[in-house]
Image (cartoon, grey):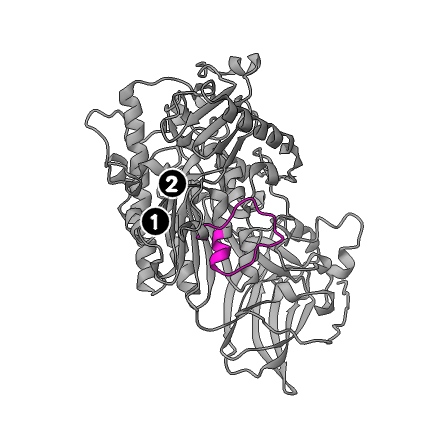
Amino acid sequence: MIIGLVFPACKKDSFPEKRLFRFIDRMTMENVAQSPLAKMSGETGMSNKIYPLKSYPVADLGTGENPYGIKRKLNIRNADSNILFAPPESRYVFDIVIPAGSVLEFGTGIVRDRNSQEILETRTQEEPACTFSLLLEAEGEKTTLFQKTHSFPKKDQSMVFQTHEIDLSGSPGRARLTFVTEAPHPHFSFWSNPVLYKKGSTGNNIILISLDTLRADHLGCYGYERETSPAIDTLAEDSALFLNTYSSSPWTLPSHVSLLTSLNPMRHGVHYENEKMDSSFVTLADLLRQEGFFCSAFTGGGFVNAVYGFSKGFDSYGQSSRGIHQKDSAEWICASALDWIEDHRDRDFFLFIHTYQPHNPFSSPPPFNSLFLDEDDRWNELDMLEYVGGKKGIFKKLPDRERENIVNLYDGEIRYTDAKLIGPLMGRLKELGLYDSSLIILTSDHGEEFYDHGGWEHGHTLYDELLKVPLIIKLPESRFAKTRISTIVRLIDVMPTILDEQGISVSGLDLDGKSLVPVLRGKEVADRRFVAYKADNILDSHVPQKLSVNEERNKLILNRSFTAEQLDFFAFPPPEPVPVELYDLSENPAENKNIVDEKPRIASRLVQLINDLYAKINEGKSEKADIDKELLEQLRALGYLR
């Protein structure tokens, strides 16, 4: 075995400034007392083989240098989690001060994959194993705090993994902690997210919920006549309800990038299904983790998969195919989130929850699938996109009864999500005493069209049925409860609002969004300007580029014309394209009366603004996403790919 030695210079103790100390943030070359990676990382042709296949270097804000690529994110139990990669023999040494009432939390594990099999060349009759030890030196005494031996994963296992917790409340303040892995054979062994935190929560918790494909106008608190959302409506009573919130994109990927970075699409540059956010962008989770929050996510995967950069800043970012392939995905997401909350209720946390439940195909479990059906309805579940013939059929006109049937199924999905995710989540938060003190935000990434403008599904237009999303903000102690805000705001305003509420400065970040706190306080009453963009031919849709902006309640949409080749793609022709559309949303919320000729000055100003925005579209810094077969299957299940 090749061993590299680097001895730490103990020139300064590390002190946790916040309630949470992450070893991965404090680790530098000085902390690496021993690692085979020191030699292996320099060997020609080995750079991509000495690490687990389902891992990549950490880019979280505040993690600093990454000696030998030790700091990584690894997929553990369907979640991309921060690890210190530690193939034996590794020794990582930290001089710290252990605060009173502290807990040390970490995981240990071994990966079995193609790369590890190639490294593990030497075999013996004995089962290969690796021992993890945690050594404490304090006041001249040495103690083994922890020791665990893991056997190499069996042939049907991709990993062995276990979490651990050590109570250090009685330990002396100044100490040296050494993380050691030892084995007679090479292994892909690792320490998962080792952290030191103080017991007890300040109740300072943030929960951001994204219900994919949820139209605001199908919720009771937004005036919908059906009882689709009793739990959401109850939450809205304790919250500020924003009646006119605009997304920056009519489909999942760019919209969520905007939500979690507060950047418009032309700034973040993620326009297509094979692009991901640049690792240099600062995310909401990045900033919250630096303030001592545990940051975790439970998502449905697909276009919010970590492969698109969404794991940045999260200690653990979950994405399971079950969140797409199962009819009860909202219930599964809820159970996962509640288990996590139970385990983390004694600390400050940021939790991002996302579900595709309202998304096509519409097939919620009974009785919710038939809750709003009429006696003569044809379907009690339906893949609507498949029924119309895929992307080629999105402009197919269906009989009114079929359209109503589809809407009924969609409403059943909303009610199921409300009953199996929002209701239990809010109920458990109250039982745990976390509800009142928590900041809870519920929103969506985009809506869904039911032939409102001659089409189905989403991603192809910039009308309000796709851009207007719900935004419900419950502040701690229900400040601003029952406040109803009619001012136009944006999804990009969510991130700066959360940061403002936490007292975190955004100076120097150059965000496109702004905090909504001044709006809540009545200090800002003007409509904000939104920008929405749809790139040319996304998801092989053959629909050309579109961009929309507003001036107060005047909304302009600029449409690039269909090419002859694009028109030939469709089995049913799209509505006749109009280059410039202008709507007065106050007088014509249905957007069916184009007034571009009636307000030429406003149209001219907005067209010029859009032209300026078009010039910046290629300035975004997106990267190419590495999409594997599993993710492709998830996207097919959602109807995005065929």
Q: Indicate the position of residue 233 as horizontal and vertical percent values.
A: 29, 47
- Would you call the spot at circle 2 few (<14 residues within 10 Å), some (14-19), or many (20 or more)? many
Which residue sits at x=26%, y=24%? Answer: 378
Q: Is any atom of residue 296 visible in this view?
A: no
Q: Indicate the position of residue 22 as horizontal and vertical percent values.
A: 59, 66
Q: Which residues are magenta?
A: 497-517
Q: Is residue 223 above or below residue 288?
A: above
Residue 615 location, quadrant = top right
Q: Residue furthest left?
A: 375
Q: Indicate the position of residue 394 as horizontal and vertical percent values.
A: 43, 22
- Would you call the spot at circle 1 few (<14 residues within 10 Å), some (14-19), or many (20 or more)? many
Q: Is any atom of residue 433 visible in this view?
A: yes
Q: In front here: 418 or 464? A: 464
Q: Which residue is mark 1?
A: 421
Q: Indicate the position of residue 198 as horizontal and vertical percent values.
A: 50, 73
Q: In front here: 207 or 584? A: 584
Residue 132 location, quadrant = bottom right
Does 560 appear in magenta? no
| Residue kind at label 2, given as amino acid type | Gln
Which residue sits at x=24%, y=40%? Answer: 227
Q: Residue furthest bottom?
A: 140
Q: Is residue 369 above or below residue 61?
A: above
